[in-house]
Image (cartoon, rainbow, N blue to C red):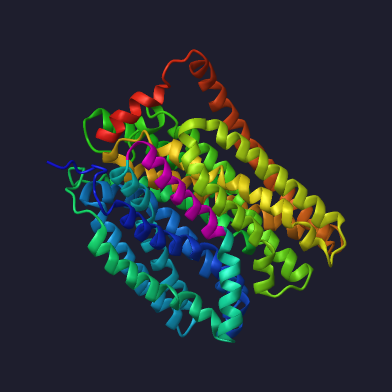
Amino acid sequence: MQRPDDSSDPNRWRALWVTLVAGFMTLLDVTIVAVALPSMQEGLHASAASVQWVVSGYALAFALTLVTAGRIGDAFGRRRVFLAALAAFVLFSAAAGAAPGIGLLVLARIFQGVAAGSLAPQNSALIQQLFHGAERGRAFGFFGATVGVSSAVGPVVGGLILALAGPEGWRWIFYVNVPVGVVALVLGFRLLPRVAPGGRGRLDPVGVALLGTGMLALMLPLVLAESGGLTKVWWLFPAGAVVLAAFARWERRVARRGGQPLLEPGLLTETRGYATGAGLAALYFVGFSGVWLVFALFFQRGLGFSPLMSGLAVTPFAVGSAAAAAVAGRLVERLGRLLTVWGLIAVMAGLGATALLLWLAPADRAAWYAVPALLLAGIGSGCVISPNITMTLRDVPVRMAGAAGGALQTGQRLGGAVGTAALPGLFYLTLNATHEDYQEAVALSVGCAVAAMLCALTVAVRDWRRDVPTEETGCPPETSHSHTHAGQG
């Protein structure tokens, strides 16, 4: 009898591509909309503060849904949740494109974010379910490439759509999801495996409420940063920390009593590599997510580029990231954490060189000079995101793969929220202090992104050094035993 997680499913690679296309759409929508905000504001006669919620509302709903949706997928079936979430994403994409006013647009975006957050953890969980061994590393390599490239190409795709579609082009940023999503939905019905749910079909409502409240308190000041959220509601940070501490305590209590916690404490304390990988991802995404807004501000406002040209200026990063992520998925089984160490060094060197070139080179040639440095940074990023996802999730038992993937992506989204609030904020502060020296502002902001990645490098080096003695003795790594167990979980 075929196990629910048997990798002999003949459709597994085609099913993977269906999930990756859907995942690419949801992650692309985090960054693609940013380049269209001026067009939306003008077309809907909206204020700058209200139109910012088109981005912030989506990101907030996305992050708040991830862990709970992952747990629902574990309990009630990942195929069912994936298809329902994809259908909802298509529906609310159409609603956002047709919105007659800013209020309905923001509402559609919030529901679109809920759908995206419900879909995202099913991607990594389905990889856990369908693939084993080296195949799982390759599959996570493609998944990591999707995560990295979708963020990087958002400005390019958004700029291209605006250039082709005219004054109302911002609506097509949402409409383009509809035909792609419908095709993915049809293929998903045909190719995704029908397996019995891995859980007992029960949720932890107290855990859901505590986690949601704590995450909302931490993220709300960040998404409101441009309207003064960091100074007006700063008190939400300590309040959120207290609520999340209560969440951790509650989850341990549920687990001790034999119940089903929303997020099993053993993921962080007993699953090899999970805590390290989640922490590394959160730190890395502080710099990775924030830097795209800084580049957009510099190229469009500082150098006068169109949205399309601004996106094309950072295309070398996307190209390098896509190429490296596909290769890194095959190398991670052999090199392990060392691959992310070298990747972080490369992305820091590339972004550091980019910061110096954009600062010191003549403004009219700075973008051209930065091409090799951005390519190096992209190659490094492809060796960070993809392998880190593999090493973080490969030893997670399949029965809790959805919740684990959701928690990992929640850390990424929280790190991204910090970066997208802090780095553009620093950019504007530097502009004011230097009488609008855009080159100095971009250099300082990108330099701070590199500093956040240095923190991630510290975590990666510590994890790598911990494994070195085991490798030198010739003994099998600890992960090999837990990997076999996880595959059967």
Kindly give the residue lying farthest to the left in the view shown: 1
The percent position of residue 397, horizontal first and vertical second, equals 30, 35
Q: Quadrant of residue 24?
A: bottom left
Task: State yes or no: residue 471 in magenta.
Answer: no
Residues 44 and 472: in front is 472
Kindly give the residue lying farthest to the top in the view shown: 473
Q: Quadrant of residue 180?
A: bottom left
Residue 231 visible (yes or no): no
Q: Main secondary structure of the magenta part?
A: helix
The percent position of residue 292, horizontal first and vertical second, equals 64, 59
Q: Please provide the residue range marked out in magenta.
A: 132-151
The percent position of residue 95, horizontal first and vertical second, equals 39, 78
440 relative to 226 in the view: left or right: right
Viewport quadrant of the C terminus: top left
Residues 199 and 139: in front is 139
205 relative to 447 in the view: left or right: left
Residue at x-position 28% and y-position 39%: 398
Residue at x-position 39% and y-position 75%: 178
Viewport quadrant of the N terminus: top left
Residue 188 visible (yes or no): yes
Residues 192 and 40: in front is 192
Residues 1 and 41: in front is 1
Residue at x-position 30% and y-position 40%: 400
Residue 395 higher or lower than 72, as above or below: above
The percent position of residue 118, horizontal first and vertical second, equals 35, 57
Residue at x-position 43% and y-position 34%: 274
